[in-house]
Amino acid sequence: MSRTPIIIDTDPGVDDAAAILLAFASPEIEVLGITAVAGNVPLTATLANACRIVALSGRTEVPVMAGAEGPLLREQVYGKYAAIGAFPEHLVGSGGVTPAPEHAAAFIARTARAAAEAGTPITLCAIGPLTNIALALRLHPDVARGIARIVCMGGAFTALGHRVPWAEFNVFADPHAAGIVFGSGVPLVLFPLDVTMQALFTADHVAALRDGGSAGGRALAALLSEYDRSDPARYGRPGGPLHDAMTVAWLIAPDLFTGRPARVGVEEGGTTPGHTWADFTDPSAAATVMSQVDEAGYIALVVDRIAARAPAAQKETTA
Ligand code: RIB
Ligand code: CA
């Protein structure tokens, strides 16, 4: 099986944790590195959380790097769960993984340029504000050549925003970075709120994660229990989304998703910064905007893989 080489750029974040655990539990994916960015919580916490997930997964060969501690131009905004900060040790543990010294943008640029040289372009899995990726793209013209595609959780086209009514958080947190990424010419596969909110993880799914036997499943179940994302008022039924895991799930099982080619853009200033738009009239457009997901298939993939394999750990004895 040929493995897809990816860098995960992330602001963990509970749903980021699910995406990283899914990637580690999937033989189809080769994680080259994890780059942290400020977003859900400040950079110090996103970096610590990324290190803890790597330690928990036993994947200490995967480097973790710190990136931008704030957006390119706009004032800093954090996620609505910013109070979480660093994951509590009783939920995820600290693990003893320390970040590599290289800056995230430099790591992305160096890795992409080497991939361009070798003719083996990489995939960027962008599941936080796009600041690191925008910086990397600006470091050298060869960076874009080494990136096969950017699979990005971001934007809202038919759905309302959730951090603000007009925008999805990752784009809202750094609209200028999103503008650079959207305009880079690198093929873009976007998972907007339109599709990520179609799949809701319920208490039964949390129990399956908890009881599946893996340390990763137990940790994710603990995070989902502690930080319940269900919102029946918004979704009209029990459960909450794991937005970011869709990007990794698509790399593993693309047939679970339906998307359309589109030209996409973002409002970088004005009264609705971070608002995203899509023009679906051009079949040759460079972006693909996902609009539908097989909810049951997606949830089963996430739960079964993480519960069983992330990482396989001794079942707790009942004695
Ligand atoms: O809007 C959802 C996105 O914002 C997710 O990536 C979540 O982790 C936060 O970063
Ligand atoms: Ca995220």
Image (cartoon, rainbow, N blue to C red):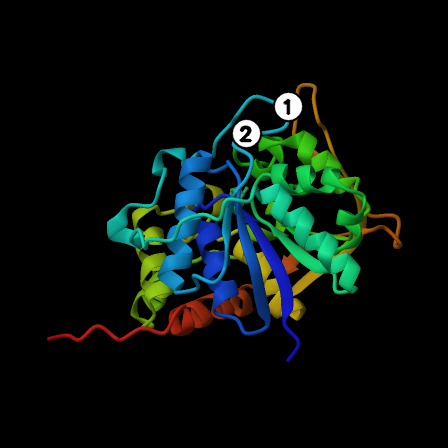
Residue at 70% x, 19% y is: 270
Closer to us: 143 or 46: 143
Q: Are marks 1 and 2 in contact (CB under 8 Å)?
A: no
Q: CA distance from mark 1 to mark 2?
A: 9 Å
Q: Is residue 226 above or below residue 216?
A: above
Which residue bears the numbered disc 2? Answer: 70
The quadrant of the image that shows the C terminus is bottom left
The image shows residue 258 at horizontal and vertical percentages of: 70, 61
Position of 217 compared to 181: left or right? Answer: left
Q: Is residue 144 in view?
A: yes
Position of 139 compared to 73: left or right? Answer: right
Numbered mark located on residue 73 in the image: 1
The image shows residue 211 at horizontal and vertical percentages of: 30, 70
Closer to us: 181 or 98: 98
Does dot 2 land on a helix, a strand or a loop?
Answer: loop
Closer to us: 229 or 70: 70
Kind of residue indicated by mark 2:
Gly
Q: Residue furthest bottom?
A: 1
Q: Residue furthest front?
A: 101
Q: Residues within 10 Å of mark 1 (few under 14, many from 20)?
A: few
